[in-house]
Image (cartoon, rainbow, N blue to C red):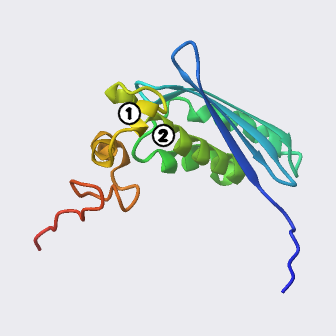
């Protein structure tokens, strides 16, 4: 059984804690047709995207670079419930770019992970938070991650099923 690699897409995301106290997110999408960079600046306390800028350095069509300015539409978004739908609305669809949307979704998802514990005083991607026992990490992250996976589906403890609703 042979196979031949025909393509690859890489997404890389770097998150920095800036001297200003803000979070700087540098993300890139690279495949044979695209090289897209999306830079976000996030206020970690309000979880708000305060700056968003994109560049399409490699693209398949002459119209593609024009959608880079759509990244500005991400400014003001709060990283929380419903943000992924809002990203799709603002930078995807017929007037946007599916690849910019994909990159923005991945960048925001990873940024959200880095922000867990910030509001509770742990700091950005805190080692102190990561060393907590599972139940303590769950308690801190429960509200932010509600409904995102099986662990945070609504129970009171990790892996506990949500309360049953009576018909």
User: As rendered, which of 2 and 49 lies closer to the eye?
Assistant: 2
Above or below, 136 against 72 in this view is: below
Task: Give the x, y percent position of residue 82.
Answer: 42, 47
User: As drawn, is 149 to the left or to the right of 140?
Assistant: right
**Residue sitting at 60 percent across and 41 percent down?**
107
User: As rendered, which of 145 and 51 lies closer to the eye?
Assistant: 145
Q: Earlier in the sequence, mark 1 or mark 2?
A: 2
Q: Which residue position is annotated with label 1?
A: 117
Task: Give the x, y percent position of residue 98.
Answer: 68, 53
User: As drawn, is 34 to the left or to the right of 48?
Assistant: right
Task: Give the x, y percent position of residue 66.
Answer: 79, 38
Outermost residue, top side: 20
Above or below, 139 against 125 in this view is: below
Above or below, 148 against 75 in this view is: below
Q: Which residue position is annotated with label 2?
A: 112
- Asked which secondary structure carries label 1, the reply is loop
**Disc 1 vs disc 2: which is toward the camera?**
1
Above or below, 17 against 161 in this view is: above
**Residue sitting at 82 percent across and 53 percent down?**
31
């Amino acid at each position: 059984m042979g196979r031949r690699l025909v393509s690859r897409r890489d997404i890389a995301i770097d998150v920095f804690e800036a001297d200003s106290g803000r979070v700087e997110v540098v993300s890139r999408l690279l495949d044979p047709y695209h090289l897209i960079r999306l830079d976000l600046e996030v206020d970690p306390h309000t979880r708000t995207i305060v700056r968003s800028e994109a560049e399409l350095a490699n693209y398949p069509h002459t119209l593609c670079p024009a959608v880079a300015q759509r990244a500005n539409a991400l400014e003001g978004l709060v990283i929380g419930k419903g943000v992924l739908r809002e990203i799709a609305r603002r930078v995807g669809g017929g007037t946007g770019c599916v690849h910019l949307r994909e990159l923005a979704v991945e960048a925001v998802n990873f940024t959200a992970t880095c922000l867990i514990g910030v509001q509770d005083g742990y700091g950005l991607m805190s080692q102190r938070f990561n060393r907590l026992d599972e139940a303590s990490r769950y308690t801190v992250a429960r509200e932010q991650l509600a409904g995102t996976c099986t662990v945070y589906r609504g129970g009171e403890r990790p892996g506990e099923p949500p309360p049953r609703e009576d018909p």
